[in-house]
Image: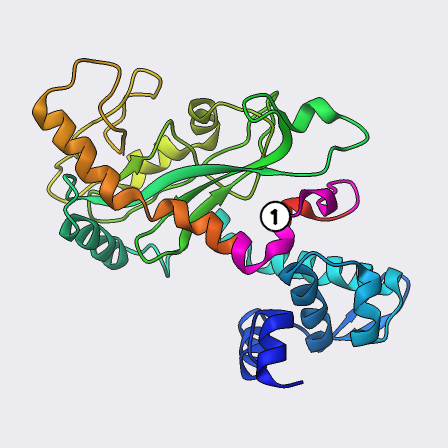
Amino acid sequence: MNDAECLAKFRLRKHDLRILSEVLQIPDSFRCYQRGVVDGMEGLCILLRRLSYPCRYSDMISRFGLPVPVLSMVSNDVLDFIYNTHRHRITQWNHNALNPAALQTYSSVISGKGAALHNCFGFVDGTVRPVCRPGEHQRVIYNGHKRVHALQFQCVALPNGLIGNLFGPVDKFCGEGLYKERVGDFNFTMFLTRNIGRVSGVKKGRKHDAGMLADSGLLQDLQRFANSPAGSMPDRRTSKMDPHRIYLQTPFRNRALTAPMIAFNQSMITVRESVEWLFNDIVNYFKFMDFKKNLKISLSSAGKM
């Protein structure tokens, strides 16, 4: 297989596969529950092939020489391994990507692009990802706003194009959380692209963003960690639907806007557009995650993809 074919099938070039395997700490082999053993690199390739484009497991037999049940088990095992090993990097505070020096860099970049806030280091946004209608408990994941069965994700988008934090799942009956923001020795704030949210994976159903914020413990984390040594506080910009906090800010709305308010909103709208690219980049790169008929939550790990 040449590099062009490898890139088309697995979304990576041949030499990048080895690097990815090392970074993800893929083991030498995977052992399925029916005692089948598959090489670690082969298991990673099976998962990448599955996610790269909507396809049947039967279409992968000619490539990997394994029966459909084994391909399914290996794909799920590799996905579970990656999720269990590395989920803390986005579901918990990642000190490598979100240390005080990095947060200062993020806020400087956002401010340098014309943002009115000089201590904003990220943006909060969410997306509703449709899934196949389940046979049971359909109301739990039904989103009345979008009128579709879906898993709802909410994340903190950083100016370097990475997801700083992710939270979920949260259903409409019992919430679980939104995004966390911990800072350190500088005073930072988050700009809310709409109503608020934190993330740790997926949120099910139609839980309101403000409700998820309350469940997330985000505000407590901000109050504990996001204070500068000088004791200064960021300005507050919230709507009546959002809790009034100094660490989370939203555009001015639901009132007669003055010229400075309009200028503030416009400056933040300009720099927050990048948050919309994150989810689109992911589903455009791995198109299987945008094929809802095969995202069956009772048969696959749809919430971990």
**Residue 300 picture location, percent across and down:** 75, 48
Image quadrant where residue 24 sits: bottom right
Give me the residue at 44% from left, 43% from top.
155
Q: In this view, does 258 lie above or below 45?
A: above
Q: Is residue 12 left or right of residue 56?
A: left
**Residue 198 picture location, percent across and down:** 44, 37
Give me the residue at 74% from left, 57% from top.
76
Which residue is under mark 1? Answer: 290
Q: In the image shown, does 186 or 299 lie closer to the viewer?
A: 299
Q: Is residue 67 above or below residue 243?
A: below
**Residue 147 picture location, percent across and down:** 61, 24
Image: magenta residue range: 283-299
Residue 305 appears in the picture as rendered: no
Examine the structure image and report whether residue 288 is included in the region drawn in magenta: yes
Placement of the N terminus among the 4 image quadrants: bottom right
Q: In the image shown, does 217 or 102 lie closer to the viewer?
A: 102
Q: In the image shown, does 174 or 149 lie closer to the viewer?
A: 149
Give me the residue at 54% from left, 52% from top.
283
Label 1: which secondary element: helix
Q: In this view, does 177 lie to the left or right of 58?
A: left
